[in-house]
Amino acid sequence: MNISQAAKATGLPAKTIRYYEDIGLVRPDRRTNGYRDFAAAEVHKLRFLARARALGFGIDNCRSLLALWEDRDRASADVRQIAHAHLAEIEEKIADLTAMRDTLSHLVVTCAGDDRPDCPILNTLSSSD
Amino acid sequence: MNISQAAKATGLPAKTIRYYEDIGLVRPDRRTNGYRDFAAAEVHKLRFLARARALGFGIDNCRSLLALWEDRDRASADVRQIAHAHLAEIEEKIADLTAMRDTLSHLVVTCAGDDRPDCPILNTLSSSD
DNA sequence: ATAAGGCTTCCCGTGACTGGAAGGTCAAGA
DNA sequence: TCTTGACCTTCCAGTCACGGGAAGCCTTAT
């Protein structure tokens, strides 16, 4: 399977697939002409990676998850630990963004948004307290 | 005022302040020995920038907001427009992260997290549907 | 024979910094 | 006066996960 077919099969851009090979996440075969040749197992790995990335896992976590996936003697506790830590990071980001959203939405509502210069948004940004 | 004092006064790292000068957000004076010298107005700008960044505004938006802040003939509508667009981006991010969190927290709850290999997290990541 | 499209590698750019090296400057103490 | 340590300066490289684009080879169809 060519790289563009692997891309279509996984939803990943070809560029991303090459990058994943660069950093050692997948290892496709090579044809005599130098083209990559993706076997079903490699495509399956790519799909796994695409799903893990879609859940926000970083590349390092993806590497670990992939290794656990391929390890038949894994302990599910190891998988859960990674997911749990990642979940905590996501919740922290949500909390940060929610705080920003609350502040911002209040400011946006308060701002007249007309042609006059007075603006509570700028007042808040420049307040000296 | 030296850069380290400006840093203390604004909460920004000195490195960040130098970066802001590099990209033209502030323009501190220079002493004869080459040291930067921050007047009160520049420190005020830095505080403005620190607050805007804390609300998640990107550097380009910060530049625009700073220009509007210094423009006495500004229309508050322009400020509001920037804040409103940024708010929409934040809400999109929150939605994305919330979807991840929901999926992940469900998986984490479902996973036994013991020494056996069976794991719904990996099952989901590798599912073929 | 040629043209279009796919494949390859390689290098640069992204955002907003952060770390570190190499070296000049300053204030205080021995 | 000398030295030490804490500043300050510039410049270069790295971060994360790719994306854009160039230069050139390979394949397929006309």
Image: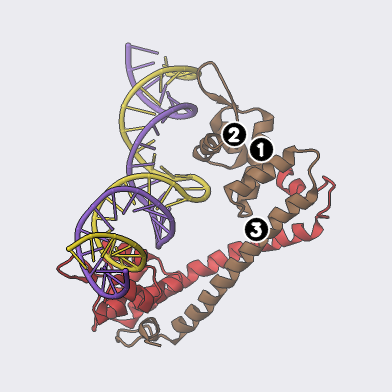
Chain colours: A brown, B red, C purple, D yellow
Whether discs 1 and 3 lie on one chain: the answer is yes
Q: Where is residue D6 shown, x and y percent of the image?
A: 35, 68
Q: Amino acid at mark 1?
A: Lys
Q: Amino acid at mark 2?
A: Ala
Q: Residue at x 39, y 71 (%)?
A: B12
Mark 3, other Cα within 10 Å: few <14 / some 14–19 / many ≥20: some
* Residue A45, numbered circle: 1
Does the rendering let one see residue B79?
Answer: yes
* Residue A86, numbered circle: 3
- Chain under label 3? A
Q: Residue at x 66, y 64 (%)?
A: A88
Q: Where is residue A127 shown, x and y percent of the image?
A: 37, 86
Q: Earlier in the sequence, mark 2 or mark 1?
A: 2
Left or right position of A84 against B90: right
Mark 1, other Cα within 10 Å: few <14 / some 14–19 / many ≥20: many
Does the rendering let one see residue B65?
Answer: no
* Residue A6, numbered circle: 2
At numbered mark 3, what does the secondary structure look like: helix, strand or loop? Answer: helix
Q: Where is residue B8 shown, x and y percent of the image?
A: 38, 76
Q: Residue at x 45, y 73 (%)?
A: B54
